[in-house]
């Protein structure tokens, strides 16, 4: 039987707060970091204390440090770091480039001392967080490492991003309204998030607390289109593959929910097709109206939100949702909803039809 990959540490720096607890508490209260920005569109305010060209590195380092502090991995262990971002901004590159050679991640990993250390990177645009988790589990399954630190960061509150996405017509003009008939686009946000993954047997052997088990993950792509707006079928397949035999026991979905005209209907259709009649019984929310769209860091932060929703029995609200586009159980209102969540799913999509779905479960379920 395969040893279950398990989460033993989490760290986050988001527009809602620095640290996992601060961001989560703000989210369940119904706070939003989104307001009118300096680039002509709504933007999420930058995380407190993180400014300047090096902020992506600084946020990533803070998130990884928090995750490792929670996991308490012994220094004699062999650890792999899978760290990524779309725009390095670590004093090396100043324009929009992929994470060439994992520069920012390697720099962050250099701050931590273990018996053996390897650094990898994974880039899949806004699906990069789940892609990184997939790569991390593969590294863990190889048997070469005792633990894997997975993290992603993004520093996107810049005129370049606003101009590019504004020209594409995917930024909100007034309010971010995921899955609403009046949706008009997303707001840019930035931050970082990280988790520590170990084999469950290894975590138990050293007496570590397992926060959540990763019961399924799927990473797919489609060659038919640049985005998922015309290809909900691939998303449906990713959902079914990640859910596997637990397809009838998913109780919450943290959707990608960008509030764009094309994404939201396609995602709603994919969820309905994947779960059938039961789709109406699954609590669904998008947290991007609260945090902004953190691009490459969003998937990792939203997976942490999914874990916390399951652990605390609280489904975050989809802020500004008034007229849903589909007959699904979207969590609306201004505060989180109490819910019994046995397993939670997080979904992410990136340009090039990069699609990721990951499922977490309560330990021992």
Image (tube, rainbow, N blue to C red):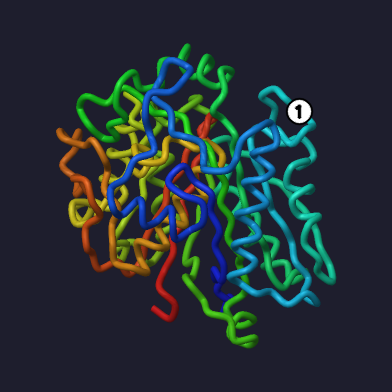
Mark 1 neighbour density, 10 Å: few (under 14) some (14–19) many (20 or more): some
Q: Is residue 259 above or below residue 364?
A: above
Residue 292: give x, y in percent of width and height. Answer: 42, 35
Instruction: Point out the residue furthest to the top here.
Output: 167
Q: Is residue 60 left or right of residue 182?
A: right
Residue 297: give x, y in percent of width and height. Answer: 55, 43
Q: Is residue 231 above or below residue 314?
A: above
- What count of labels does the image hold? 1
Residue at the spot 61% in from the left edge and 72% down from the top edge: 71
Residue at the spot 59% in from the left edge and 18% down from the top edge: 160
Q: Is residue 8 above or below residue 289?
A: below
User: Which residue is more in the foreground, 186 or 244?
Assistant: 186
Instruction: Point out the residue furthest to the front here.
Output: 49
Instruction: Point out the residue furthest to the right here.
Output: 115
Q: Is residue 141 above or below residue 26?
A: below
Q: Quadrant of the N terminus?
A: bottom right
Find disc 1 in the rendering and name its residue. 93
Q: Quadrant of the C terminus?
A: bottom left
Q: Is residue 75 left or right of residue 189?
A: right
Residue at the spot 39% in from the left edge and 28% down from the top edge: 186
Mark 1 secondary-structure assignment? loop
Residue at the spot 53% in from the left edge and 41% down from the top edge: 127
Q: Is residue 224 left or right of residue 321?
A: right
Residue 350: give x, y in percent of width and height. Answer: 51, 34
Residue 10: give x, y in percent of width and height. Answer: 54, 62
């Amino acid at each position: 039987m395969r040893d279950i990959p398990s989460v033993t540490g989490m760290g986050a720096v988001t527009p809602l707060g620095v640290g996992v607890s601060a961001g989560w508490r703000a989210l369940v209260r119904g706070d939003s970091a989104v307001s009118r920005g300096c680039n002509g569109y709504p933007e999420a305010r930058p995380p407190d204390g993180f400014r300047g060209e090096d902020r992506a590195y600084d946020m990533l380092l803070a998130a990884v440090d928090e995750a490792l502090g929670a996991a308490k991995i012994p220094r004699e262990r062999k650890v792999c770091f899978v760290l990524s971002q779309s725009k390095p901004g670590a004093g090396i590159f100043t324009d929009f480039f992929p994470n060439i050679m994992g520069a920012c991640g390697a720099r962050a990993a250099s701050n931590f001392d273990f018996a053996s250390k390897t650094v990898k990177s994974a880039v899949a645009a806004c699906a990069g967080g789940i892609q990184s988790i997939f790569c991390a589990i593969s590294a863990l399954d190889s048997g070469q490492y005792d633990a894997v630190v997975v993290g992603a960061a993004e520093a996107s509150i810049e005129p370049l991003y606003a101009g590019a996405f504004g020209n594409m017509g995917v930024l909100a003009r007034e309010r971010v309204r995921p899955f609403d008939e009046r949706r008009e686009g997303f707001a840019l946000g930035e931050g970082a998030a990280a988790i520590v993954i170990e084999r469950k047997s290894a975590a138990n052997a050293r007496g570590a607390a397992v926060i959540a088990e990763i019961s399924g993950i799927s990473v797919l792509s489609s060659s038919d289109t640049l985005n998922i707006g015309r290809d909900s079928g691939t998303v449906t397949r990713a959902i079914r593959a990640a859910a596997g035999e637990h397809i009838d026991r998913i109780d919450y979905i943290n959707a990608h929910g960008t509030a764009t005209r094309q994404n939201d209907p396609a995602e709603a259709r994919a969820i309905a097709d994947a779960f059938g009649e039961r789709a109406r019984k699954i609590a669904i929310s998008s947290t991007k109206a609260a945090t902004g769209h953190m691009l490459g860091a969003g998937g990792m932060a939203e997976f942490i939100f999914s874990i916390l929703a399951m652990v605390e029995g609280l489904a975050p609200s989809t802020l500004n949702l008034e007229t849903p586009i589909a007959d699904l159980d979207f969590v609306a209102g201004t505060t989180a909803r109490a819910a019994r969540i046995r397993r939670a799913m997080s979904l992410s999509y990136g340009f090039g039809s990069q699609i990721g779905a990951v499922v977490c479960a309560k330990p021992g379920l």
